[in-house]
Amino acid sequence: MAILKFRVFLEEDDTIYRDVAIKHTQTFYDLHQAILKGYEFDSIHEASFYRSNDNWHSGRAISLEKYEGVEYKVEPLGMIETIIGSEIKDTEQKFIYVYDFKKNWTFHIQLISVSKEENPKLTYPAITRKEGIGPSQYGIKSILGDKFADIEEKYDLSAIGEGFSDEGEDDGNQDEELGGEESGAEDESSF
């Protein structure tokens, strides 16, 4: 059985990518799920693959479903039914993957290798390599991730207020108690 390895990278930044190994008998739906898992996206939005040429121009759609308001030049293929091996026409086959049509997350997918042997340690499809910090689907992703929330709870950083604390603050009466000149003399002698 052939194992296909695809590189899935962001359209605007090819240094951020995920390599996905998948059996040639699996479907585009399986690839769709692997990409979402690799980039830590949820699976609640619309999605389509498109056949692509070498210049990344989109061709026939391979869609999760036929969407209202989307113009199709040709009837789209179904992602759940379409076997990946049936769409491989080239040793460097390319596809475009679009997820969440409102946010328009666009990924370029390129076949980078074909192997005849399965790795018994992997469950296909499998993410075999991750490069770069992927984008956050809905906003800013912290480098610390969920760990920061644990720190905030442990030390209750929210109780301090807006970045300020009471530590080190005087009640403002020190100058009045010491008198103007004496406080200056004491300050100089302390150096």
Image (cartoon, rainbow, N blue to C red):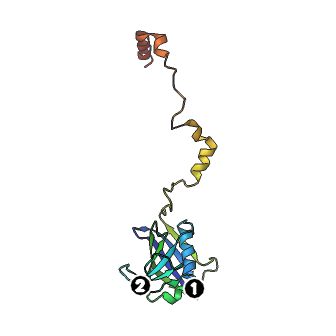
| Mark 1 residue crowding within 10 angstroms, few (<14) / some (14–19) / many (20+) | few
Q: Amino acid at mark 1?
A: Glu
Q: Is residue 124 left or right of residue 48?
A: right
Earlier residue among tags 1 and 2: 2
Q: Is residue 188 above or below residue 116?
A: above
Residue beneath disc 1: 81
Q: Residue at x 52, y 71 (%)?
A: 129
Query: Tag 2, which secondary structure?
Result: loop
Q: Which mark is residue 14?
A: none
SS under mark 1: loop
What residue is shown at x 49% (from left), y 57% (from top)?
A: 139
Instruction: For label 2, count other residues whose C-alpha is less than 10 Å away and answer few (under 14), some (14-19) or many (20+).
Output: few
Amino acid type for the residue under numbered disc 2: Lys
Q: Is residue 123 above or below residue 39?
A: below
**In the image, which disc is placed on residue 73?**
2
Which percent across, then down, holds residue 20? 53, 76
On screen, residue 5 above or below 135? below
